[in-house]
Each structure stands twice: as structure tokens, then as C-alpha cells.
Image (tube, rainbow, N blue to C red):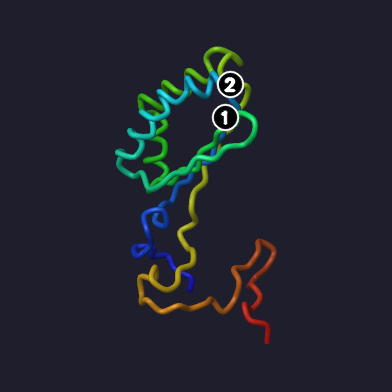
Amino acid sequence: MRTTDFSAAPPVGQATAMFVGATRYRGPRSILTLTRTWFRMVRQMRRMKGYRWHTVYYQFPFTLGTIAFFSDRDALLTFARSRHHRDLMCWVTDHGTTNATGGYIRLYNAEPEGYSNGVWRAESDGMAHIPTFTPLSTEAAGPPVHRG
């Protein structure tokens, strides 16, 4: 069912701001040096108001990335200004390509409406499907979910 009430969803389902980023480090030595600051930064992030969830991913050979969810954009940006995050970003970027050779950051905001069913529905715990798909930008209405 379509909804704007995610109060019954787990914390990550209640998040409205998402961070996706990755850094390609120079090599194993850079990644090893990174760990000292990184663990402090994660500990700080988990304690911050508005933190919902995160995961880390790896791409061969030396890229580490993060996907993190926050209650709202302000919580995400407050974390970005935090001491350990700032220290890490300065270490990554202040010395040319000594520690890292590239990276990116993307910030996403959740639309107010979405979908819920079963245990995460605020209205009831029944499973239900939506009758039509959400319309594309070129459509006035989406097609039916079940073909007639």
C-alpha cells in the first residue's frame, strides 16, 4: 500500500536522507592507516542523533565505500561536520594522491510517500499490494499491478 507513515518501519525505513560514497585508496598501507580514524568516526556516527544505519562495501583493488542512512538531511550534514569525519576527509584530500587517488559522495533525499505492507504498515498488519504502479514522469497514471 502507498503511505506517508513509516512509523512502524525499522529505523532505516524511517530515514529520509541517504549518503553513498567511496574512496579509492593508494594501497594497503593507506587502508591500514585509515582504520585508526575510521573506527573512531563510526563510533561517533552511531552515537549521533539522527543516525539510522550504515554498511560498508569493498571494490577491488583498494576502494572502500559507505552507504549510510540518517533521519534527515540536517542529521547527515551534522555528521559530515563532526571531528572524526573532518579529520578523515582532510587526511584523504590534503596531500594530493598520497593517501587516495579518487572518490565521490552522493546525497539522496527520500520522497515523503512510499510503500509499506505487513508488519511495517502503520494502519494494520495485513499484507496488501498496490492496485497500480507509481506513474513514470511521462505518465498520468501507472499501469495496473495485475494484468486484467
| Residue 85 occupies quadrant | top left
> Is the C terminus in the top left, top right, bottom left or bottom right quadrant?
bottom right
Q: Are marks 2 and 1 in contact (CB under 8 Å)?
A: yes
Residue at point 49%, 22% (across, down)? 32
Q: CA distance from mark 2 to mark 1?
A: 7 Å
**Residue 49: where, in percent of width, then height?**
30, 42
Which residue bears the numbered disc 2?
100
Judging depth in this view, the residue of 79 and 41 nearest the camera is: 41
Residue 141 horizontal side relative to residue 66, left or right:
right
- Count neighbours of disc 2 (C-alpha within 10 A) and say few if under 14, some if 14 to 19, many if 20 or more: many
**Residue 22: where, in percent of width, then height?**
56, 34
Judging depth in this view, the residue of 119 and 138 nearest the camera is: 119
Q: Earlier in the sequence, mark 2 or mark 1?
A: 1
| Residue 101 occupies quadrant | top right
Which residue bears the numbered disc 1?
23
Residue at point 50%, 40% (across, down)? 56
Residue at point 55%, 33% (across, down)? 64
Residue at point 37%, 59% (across, down)? 10
**Residue 135: where, in percent of width, then height?**
63, 68
Above or below residue 100? Residue 52 is: below
Above or below residue 7? Residue 32 is: above
**Residue 109: where, in percent of width, then height?**
49, 49
Q: Residue furthest bottom?
A: 148
Q: Amino acid at mark 1?
A: Thr
| Residue 82 occupies quadrant | top left
Q: Secondary structure at mark 1?
A: strand
- Count neighbours of disc 1 (C-alpha within 10 A) and say few if under 14, some if 14 to 19, many if 20 or more: many
Q: Amino acid at mark 2?
A: Ala
